[in-house]
Amino acid sequence: MAKGSGASIFLLIMLLAALAFASYLLYENLPIGEKQELKMQNTSGSDSIIEIGSGGGASYDGEMQFYPNMRFSKLPISYSISSECSAEKTGQMQEAIEIISSEAGISFVQASAEGDIEIMCRELDKREIRNRDYYVAGEGGPKEIVNTSLFNVILKGEVLLLKESECEEPLVSMHELLHALGFDHSVNELSVMYNVSSCRQKITADIINEIKRLYSIESLPELQLTDINATKNGRYLSFEARIRNSGLADSGSTTLAVYAEGELIGSYDIDAIEIGAGIFLSVENSRLPGRNVNEVRFVIDPENSIRELSEENNAVVLNTESA
């Protein structure tokens, strides 16, 4: 074989090898091929969403509260009493607060300015009390609420006292204060939450137990991946994620870590999230360690730097094989 011919063949082989290698690099590194949508893996345990039950009781024919799991975010609950309230109304409200605090084990503190619960007063005129079987002695209830999905967090409550209680116990004040704590009317005529007042009424065990249940839950944030969509194109991952704070306190700043087959491929800063609020994160073409990645794991707060209601549900696993 001629010397020139051998050199040409060698150069051809090298050229073909270079083209093959370049094709391989293109195949591995460009988003070539059909897009694959990643599906959520059927998991339980650490990936489950926590559930907070809602109470009920014999004194109620439905839910005890206006909405499930109504409570203030933290204790003590502050309150303010308007200077327009008479000494008698002020005394009865303070007595009502002491009774609920003692019976249910929650704490209140009087605020120098506007409190979590604002207590106001005005006097009934003669026309309003003419029919004593039907006059309204007061009004109360939550004023501002945030639905976090786990709780209906009361931000502000208010009470308007129109009439002093004529009973030995401050039933009017207790009734309206319990409204401000989220409790609806009871069907039990002997309950302080019955819609017509009677001096035989008491704060019943079901109400006390529900307050204890609600406020036994520590005031902590709860970060959750409420919605996540991801697609894989070659060795590139694109995803959209919604992160919500479903807890009882604002969260601090943290990160969202993304792992492919156990290898960290991205870490994204997440700002502090207020109670009931959320953020949306969109990432395009995050590089995977290879084309054959089948499983991607998303983890909120991977360093456990934030104390939450549950530390066991911060991960979501997606893969290309689940239906």
Image (cartoon, helix red, strand yellow):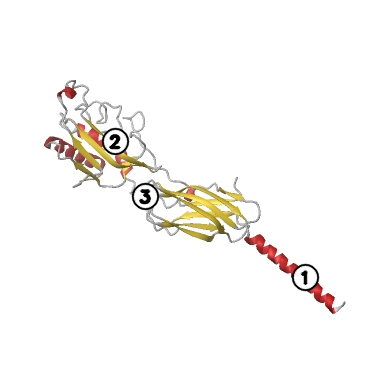
Q: Quadrant of the N terminus?
A: bottom right
* Residue at 21% in and 24% down: 135
Residue 227 shown left or right of residue 133 in the figure: right
Looking at the image, do the residues carrying marks 3 and 2 touch, with CB atoms under 8 Å apart? no
Q: Quadrant of the C terminus?
A: top right
Task: Indicate the quadrant where residue 119 lies.
Answer: top left
Q: Viewer-nearest of labels 1 and 3?
A: 1
Residue 316 shown left or right of residue 182 in the figure: right
* Most distant residue in the top direction: 131
Q: Which mark is residue 207?
A: 2
Give amino acid for label 1.
Ile
Q: Which residue is mark 1?
A: 13
Measured as percent of width and height from the top left, residue 110 is found at 19, 45
Whichever of callouts 3 and 2 sits on the residue coming sooner in the sequence is: 2
* Most distant residue in the left direction: 87
Label 2: which secondary element: helix
Using the image, determine if residue 137 lies above or below residue 261. above
Q: Which mark is residue 274?
A: 3
Task: Indicate the quadrant where residue 183 lies.
Answer: top left
Give amino acid for label 3.
Glu
Give amino acid for label 2.
Ile
Q: Residues within 10 Å of mark 1 (few under 14, many from 20)?
A: few
